[in-house]
Amino acid sequence: MRVLIYGLPGAGKTYMAKKLCEYLGDNVAWFNADKVREEANDWDFSDEGRLRQNTRMRLLCEEAESKGKISIADFVAPFENARVEFNADIEIFMDTIQESKYEDTNKVFERPTYAEYIVREKRGDKDAKLVAWLIGNTFIWDNRAPTTQMLGRYQPWHDGHQALLERALAKHGQVILMVRDMSTDSSNPYSAEQVIENLQDKLVKYAGKVNLVIVPNILNITYGRDVGYKIEQEKFDKEIEDISATKIRSEST
């Protein structure tokens, strides 16, 4: 798959690309505009030079994808028709500034009519984490692949849950993590939506391997004979099993 991160100079494209590479792991090829121009020794910013750079970035991405990589390109990409020709699977428009210090670039930059993700303000890592989940859920997660299920409240997520997740991932390589939708009270201080936000923050390195979903307040799981799956209780050492979410909530309060 191919990701295009574009916008005016100084909008935060390179920072976004760097964080995505951290979150998505080793199967990523990142192409930064300045480094690619330097390697090509091409600093022509005329319309022709910009189109040439667009083609250069696309070809580099295609080569990486032929080797099974996720390609990420960050560059200004000022022309709408050139962005179409670049043919990204996900476009991320960094709309954090209205103009850059380069007047020639400001004049030629064409704002997009559509992008899969638009960043309107610089919010640290938050948008990079959300984009990592978008990429993981859309292009990496395989709904037909063997999967382990985890179901819980996760109020809050703690080391015991983490140990269980690692063991669950070891079984089939991907986990669907279901958050029970419950009324908030002293035992459940966070809404299901808040739990999902917390998990997106803590588990971003698993984007594509873990799928986070909110489900009803499930109290019973029933099955008949020969259902084709197993329900298992995992055993851990005393230190892990003694972790108490109630105690963590109390200490947090």
Image (cartoon, rainbow, N blue to C red):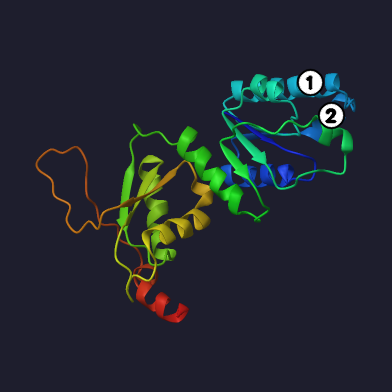
Is residue 104 or residue 179 the one in the foreground? 104
| Mark 1 residue element | helix
Most extreme residue toward the left, as rendered?
225
Up the image or down, 178 lies above or below 65; here it is below
Question: What amino acid does circle 2 point to?
Answer: Arg
Residue 244 visible somewhere in the drawing: no
Is residue 16 or residue 172 the one in the foreground? 16
The N terminus, quarter of image: top right
Please rate how many residues cluster around mark 1, counting C-alpha atoms within 10 Å: few if below 14, some from 14 to 19, many from 20: some
Tell me the tag on residue 51.
1
Is residue 174 or residue 93 the one in the foreground? 93
Residue 210 visible somewhere in the drawing: yes
| Mark 2 residue element | helix
Please report the residue visible at 88 percent of the width from the left and 27 percent of the height from the top: 45
> Horizontally, is 82 left or right of 147 in the view?
right
What count of labels does the image hold? 2
- Residue 155 picture location, percent across and down: 38, 67
Up the image or down, 180 lies above or below 144; here it is below
Q: Which residue is mark 2?
A: 37
Please report the residue visible at 76 percent of the width from the left and 21 percent of the height from the top: 56
Residue 32's quadrant in the figure?
Answer: top right
Q: Nearer the viewer, mark 2 or mark 1?
A: 1
Please report the residue visible at 49 percent of the width from the left and 53 percent of the height from the top: 200
Please rate how many residues cluster around mark 2, counting C-alpha atoms within 10 Å: few if below 14, some from 14 to 19, many from 20: some
- Residue 219 picture location, percent across and down: 19, 59
Residue 124's quadrant in the figure?
Answer: bottom right
The C terminus, quarter of image: bottom left
- Residue 154 picture location, percent across and down: 37, 63
